[in-house]
Amino acid sequence: MTGPGPRVNAERRERARTMAFTLINARPSPFGRKVAIVMLEKGIPFDVRYDVPWGDQTCTPDYSPLQQLPILIAGPDEVIYDSAFICDWLELRFPEIPLLPAEREARLLAMRRRMLGERLMEVAQALIFELHRPEPSTPWVDRQTRKVIGALAELDRLYGQDTTHPGTELDLGDIAVATTLLGVEFALATGLSPDVAALRWRERHAALDRAVSALEPRPSFEQTRPQMMDVNLQATVA
Ligand SMILES: N[C@@H](CCC(=O)N[C@@H](CS)C(=O)NCC(=O)O)C(=O)O
């Protein structure tokens, strides 16, 4: 299958330059950071508007039936939500700088890393929220903890199999994994998460430490460092 010709690509690049994209994001959100990094890596200009989805003044339900951030306003009639879908949308609309390999096996591996990175963030979030409840359920906490341990071990195995990756090239899998792991690290460092040994991935997983450390100096990562937001998670989940 052939892609669009150079004229179409040039037109799309021009369209991206003139389109006013707005990313509605939460300051510490790894989901939103993933989208922001994808847009920076693809050279798509955008503005950021910060929101607190759990706050009284949130604008999130105005744009997403799921009432979750991130949300990408891509035009007067085009609002995209859910970080995975936004990344897919961006990949299809702006293929000039691809973030998935063309070769089938490499693409499947990138998609596997991406899936594990995204599911790991959801599991870690479920664990952290449960631990903020007045009386966390031990079986539920244990169950989520086992998933965290399993996903981290599998990702470490995958990165350990190819110590040259990620080099100068990164893909959607790397971005999803790194934003999840750095998001977890941020949550631990700031107290958004209680100190859970299973979440301290860097000290246990050398291949993940190497892979994430290779990505952190990139401008797209430097420019999107997470920041604290004014939220009381205990009150939110109580
Ligand atoms: N699957 C969603 C998860 C996004 C998510 O959990 N966003 C959080 C902010 S970091 C949120 O908006 N939470 C509000 C809620 O779930 O009610 C995605 O990938 O976009």
Image (spheres, helix red, strand yellow):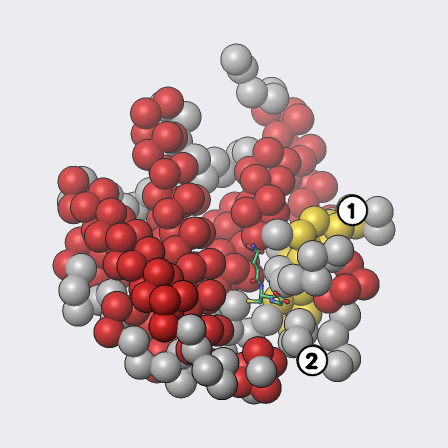
What crowding class fits label 2: few (fewer than 14 Cα within 10 Å), some (14-19), or many (20 or more)?
A: few
Residue in view at x 57 percent, y 40 percent: 88
Residue in view at x 74 percent, y 74 percent: 58
113 shown above or below 228: above
Q: Quadrant of residue 49?
A: bottom right
The percent coordinates of residue 190 (x first, y second) are 40, 84
Q: Quadrant of residue 202?
A: bottom left
What crowding class fits label 1: few (fewer than 14 Cα within 10 Å), some (14-19), or many (20 or more)?
A: few
Q: Do callouts 1 and 2 mark residues in contact (Cβ within 8 Å)?
A: no
Q: Quadrant of residue 85?
A: top right
The percent coordinates of residue 61 (x first, y second) are 77, 64
Left or right: where 103 falls relative to 162: right
- Taking the image in four quarters, ligand 1 sits in the one at bottom right
Residue type at numbered disc 2: Gly
The percent coordinates of residue 212 (x first, y second) are 28, 58
Residue in view at x 45 percent, y 39 percent: 99
Q: What residue did someone put label 1 on?
A: 78
- Under circle 1, the secondary element is strand
Q: Is residue 147 visible?
A: yes
Q: Is residue 212 visible?
A: no
Comes first in the chain, label 1 or label 2: 2
- Of the pair 64 and 143, the residue shown nearer to us: 143
- Under circle 2, the secondary element is loop
The percent coordinates of residue 110 (x first, y second) are 36, 38
CA–CA distance in space, label 1 to label 2: 25 Å
Residue type at numbered disc 1: Glu
Q: What residue did someone put label 2 on?
A: 55
Quarter occupied by the C terminus: bottom right
Residue in view at x 29 percent, y 69 percent: 199
58 shown above or below 36: below
